[in-house]
Amino acid sequence: MKFNEDKPSLVILTNLYPSPWEPNRATFNRQQFAQLDDDFNKSVLVPVAFPDWFSHRKEFKQTESLRYVPYFYLPKFGRRFYSAMMFISIILHSGLWLVRKKPKKILASWAFPEAVAASWISKLFSADFYFKVHGSDINLHGKIPARAKQIVKASKSALGILSVSQALADEMITMGIDKEKIRVIYNGVDHQKFQFQHAIANKQSDDYILYVGNLKKEKGVIELIKGFAAISKKYPTLKLLYAGPGNLRSELTNQAKDLAISDKVVLLGGVDHNQLPKLISQARILALPSYNEGVPNVVLEAMACGTPVLVTNVGGIPEVVNEEVCGKIIEAKSYSAVSEGLDYILSTTWNKSNIQLHSQQFSWQNNKRQLLKMLMSINQC
């Protein structure tokens, strides 16, 4: 992106961004921030935990508009100091880079420690400060008093706070954050990319349920495999596909053996984002039985493909999923709820066109319009 003196300089601070070893990480952030190139001289600063930095140090390709920063901290110790450690790491590594950028606006994506560190950086450069919250940055960190206090203090200097759901906005208000600063802006979907794709003629498609995301306990992946096992005999051709990396891969493999469904469970590993539209559109169900969420983009992408979704009643999910049209919302942390939900969706006829129509309200065009309104507005704090 070429520098244009007529555009204000915007620096985005976020660890939720693709990296050389995780090219599909947080593609929704990359898509959202790419929309700002027409209106700002945009640069992205990505803190990388020092163990990952050391492991992948030869893979980084630093540019003037995208910079990775080694972030030093003491794992599982003194987490209240993570914001200070991130601030110091950024200034030591990329202070001169920031001086060259002369940022007029700083946007942090993630409440702790990114937003807290960014609030201090914005004061150093007399820049307007904004931040975006996603889900567990408020639902988890916001429940820890020492961290919550830092988030609330950072919010006092923010000109605008982007919340991906009303549920998250309500949580922030409960924490003591000024509701007048909060803007609920739902993430969008690339509807040209995510749409129903017909199976190749004369080729039998696999009959499968699909999970997309990190293989973590908090994503409900264990409840999903147990719930699937409970209905597998009723649907003998049905498979369960997991698309994503994670540390529960071996546990899922063992669970599949114990449940006698090893031939029905497929661990695909990381899948390129460009491959997801076809994979999602051919699935019988997109299942995401998470314990906590903001508004997961994969659910919006599934609806854009016309695929019914099985999701949990957490975060902003009930705000974007219409059960009469799009699928089933269940309680979290219950494999029996998963099995009942899967059976319900599989035994119900769904209108793909109606699901897609519902998804049209979640577009990047709407997202950009609202985001620019927040970034360009002049607030009195």
Image (spheres, rainbow, N blue to C red):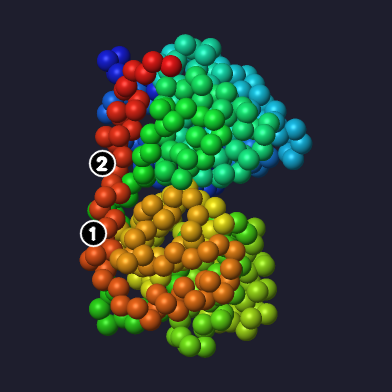
CA distance separating discs 1 and 2: 16 Å
Residue that label 2 marks: 365
Give percent across and percent down for residue 191. Answer: 27, 53
The tag earlier along the polypeptide, 1 or 2, is 1
* Label 1 SS: helix
Badge count: 2
Which quadrant of the figure has residue 254? bottom right
Residue 238, relative to residue 6: is it above or below? below
Judge left or right: residue 166 versus residue 259: left
Residue 266, visible in the rendered structure: no
Residue 159, visible in the rendered structure: yes
Type of the residue with mark 1 = Leu
Residue 134, relative to residue 204: is it above or below? above
Q: Residue at x 49, y 66 (%)?
A: 330
Q: Considering depth in this image, is 331 or 75 the residue closer to the camera?
A: 331
Type of the residue with mark 2 = Gln
As drawn, the label of residue 97 is: none
Q: Residue at x 66, y 24 (%)?
A: 84
Residue that label 1 marks: 357
Q: Residue at x 30, y 49 (%)?
A: 362
Judge left or right: residue 168 versus residue 90: left
Give percent across and percent down for residue 178. Answer: 47, 27
Give percent across and percent down for residue 101. Answer: 44, 17
Q: Considering depth in this image, is 51 or 365 the residue closer to the camera?
A: 365
Count residues near mark 1 (Cα–Cα under 10 Å), then give few for <14, some for 14-19, many for 20+. few
Q: Residue at x 50, y 19 (%)?
A: 157
The N terminus - image quarter: top left
